[in-house]
Image (spheres, rainbow, N blue to C red):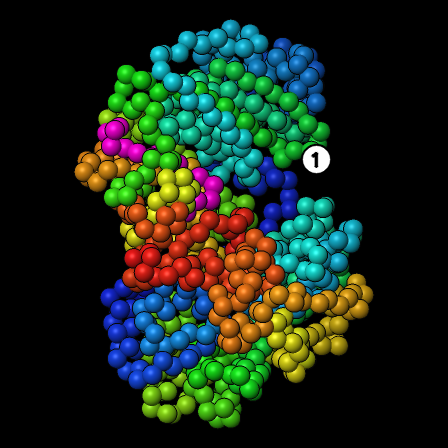
Amino acid sequence: MKYLDEFRDEELAQHLAREIRQIATRPWAIMEVCGGQTHSIVRNGLDQLLDGAVEMIHGPGCPVCVTPLELIDKALHIASIPGVIFCSFGDMLRVPGSHMDLFRVKAQGADVRVVYSPLDALRIARESPGREVVFFGIGFETTAPANAMAVHQAKLQEITNFSMLVSHVLVPPAIAAIMKSPTCRVQAFLAAGHVCSVMGYWQYSPLVEKYKVPIVITGFEPLDLLEGIRRAVVLLEAGTPQVNNAYERAVSFEGNKSAQKLLSEVFEVADRSWRGIGKIPLSGWRLRDAYREFDAESRFKVSTITAEESPLCRSGEVLQGNLKPNECPGFAKECTPRHPLGATMVSSEGACAAYFNYGRFVPVESIQ
Amino acid sequence: MLVPRISTMAVSSPWSQFSEPEQMSSVAQPDFSQWSCPLPLRDYPLIVMGHGGGGRLTSELIEHIFVPSFRNAALEVMADSSVLTLPAGRLAFSTDSYVVQPLFFPGGCIGDLAVNGTVNDISMSGAKPLYLSAGFILEEGFPIAHLAAIAERMGAAARAAGVAIVTGDTKVVEKGHGDGCYINTSGVGVISMAGPCNGSIAPSQARPGDVVILSGTIGDHGMAILSVREGLEFETILRSDTAPLNGMVESLLRFAPHLHVLRDPTRGGLASSLNEIAGQSKVGILIDERKLPILPDVQSACDLLGMDPIYVANEGKLVAIVEPGCADDMLRVMHESPYGRDAAIIGTVTAQHAGILAAKTAIGGTRVIPLQIGEQIPRIC
């Protein structure tokens, strides 16, 4: 592999798109689960290449988007406490809480820092005795191993001024929740390659059996996605729902065993609220009792903070694939990336922001 | 393939992170033994409040650092203002402030940026830049050796661009109230009315059918700064592209009536400049992403962080919008410049989708490239 160019080859992409158009006998509705997949589809104009042969439904897999409003409010509250160093991935800084976002809290004097790894936050804690250092530990199974490692190391090294505001969510329960919805239109899923590189794909077989829905694991480059879509369409046309791994170069059936071991050491499965969707039973992780001392929610006593979503925002329907972003009455009017009403408009991976930024609301003819 | 070692976030003193090795070793340190000041400068070579007080200490900085670095007749008069004689024509006037961190980075320092940035802004109206001012806001405790290195680089950049720094100012703020060193430069240049360009080059002048030419690779400066500021270590060093573009512009001006727009895509990157041109000229712009020159290392770093190089800052590139008939000749002229070797035709101006920048994507799709709301933020995963 020279680099990634091989997976961005125009000729091969056109060839795959042509093949998909040829084999699809009807416009199949396929959901890409992950925000990174949405980003790549829209940024590369993949859905245009498919020319209606497949309808891509943008799923709930943007960790920034599904982090519940009340958790953002808790983060804002903790970040505002004097003496706290609040560390976060950059994406979370613009996510609006009920009244503020982390950028504005920072402008008011809070010590909010962007880090690229939770282990950076741990290092800051080690170097800043006397300050409370809190890491905003959000994300799917992808970011979880590094977050687990940070907490594990904090305990091992007795770094007591470190804690984590945890809001981890899991892909399989979300797929199940979508399939259970009476308005569900999804006929196949593209599962996210990075989640599966950690967790493997053994968890998907029961879902395929129960809901008779093909699940294809893909990477994030244009050819990865097109090949995933092609395999999903083949399975749909044949009427043989299966789990299929189209990302063999990174994903194995078992996944990363040592990461999984660490995850089950530090986290336990718990109910989680998803922004725009609501509570899904057993759909996330929280710190186990043995690590509860590192739980920022109890350390800073913020568990009583609650919040209500904007009534205009219909991101829940968008996240479940029942509404295209541009069909929302607030889209590009009351709700823009500059004044987002819901998190799907905030994150660069959010379906609404992707539509707004990459112009799916502009008729294609007008830019050709 | 680049293997990133993402390790740290800066928490130490901002001007200690990236200093001596490459950037400063070649620069002469001030020789304190020759200074007339009897105060403890020799033992404590840091900026103190008195350096901004207008008295002896201020004079020492001017005499020992700024005058030797910037050396020119107008400055050496040491009056409250410099008196200049300008050639006939229209005046181009621009100002910019520089607050970059770290102050020294691969490919340059805040001093090069402060000179080249203003030189380039003046050049983009078709003017020949002539004179600059330099205002320094220094933080108490800032090492004088670093200031000397910055001034030295500013002098060298000014000489390379053929401009003179003819006036300046120094203020000192208390420790904790600044970030080491801020610089403002303002500058003037002249558009000769007798020359081929009579002031008609402006962001509002793009016309349907015009061709968009980019002078070289994009994203170099922004990714170089990000990688050192955030402590992201890549296997290769990404270097800023800071460079004066007035020489290249001068050689492009002979195409003047057919050269409609010049912009240097700095903050906000190429996407912002082209969006602004589309808006001001009330035209659409369609570029081909496959034709954008991007260094593989920069592309890798952007992919890794989930950033789009089209939004990343440049400090030594220009975009020219020209009539199609002279595009190839102009491209050839750019290729002859040391700062235009990777120049490429990247798109066209259209009458459709006025005000919108669109792109053909790498795999042959289409997308709209909007203005960014704020800074580009690395994606979570």
Foreground residue among B375 and A100: A100
Disc count in the image? 1
Q: Residue at x 37, y 39 (%)?
A: B281
Q: Give residue A69's quadrant in the image.
A: bottom right
Foreground residue among B167 and A341: A341
In the rendered image, is residue A64 in sight?
Answer: no
- The residue segment tinted magenta is B255-272
Q: Chain of mark 1?
A: B
Q: Is residue B158 magenta?
A: no
Residue on which the image places disc 1: B176
Q: Give residue A282's quadrant in the image.
A: bottom right
Q: Give the answer, above or below, for where B353 lies relative to B174.
A: below
Q: Quadrant of the C terminus of chain A?
A: bottom left
Q: Is residue B269 magenta?
A: yes
Q: Residue at x 70, y 22 (%)?
A: B49
Q: Residue at x 73, y 72 (%)?
A: A291
Q: Residues within 10 Å of mark 1 (few under 14, many from 20)?
A: few
Image x and y of residue B276, in percent: 42, 42
Image x and y of residue A258, in percent: 55, 76
Q: In the figure, is residue B345 to the left or right of B314?
A: left
Image x and y of residue A229, in percent: 37, 77
Q: In the figure, is residue A265 to the left or right of A32?
A: right
Q: Give the answer, above or below, for where A183 lies relative to A122.
A: below
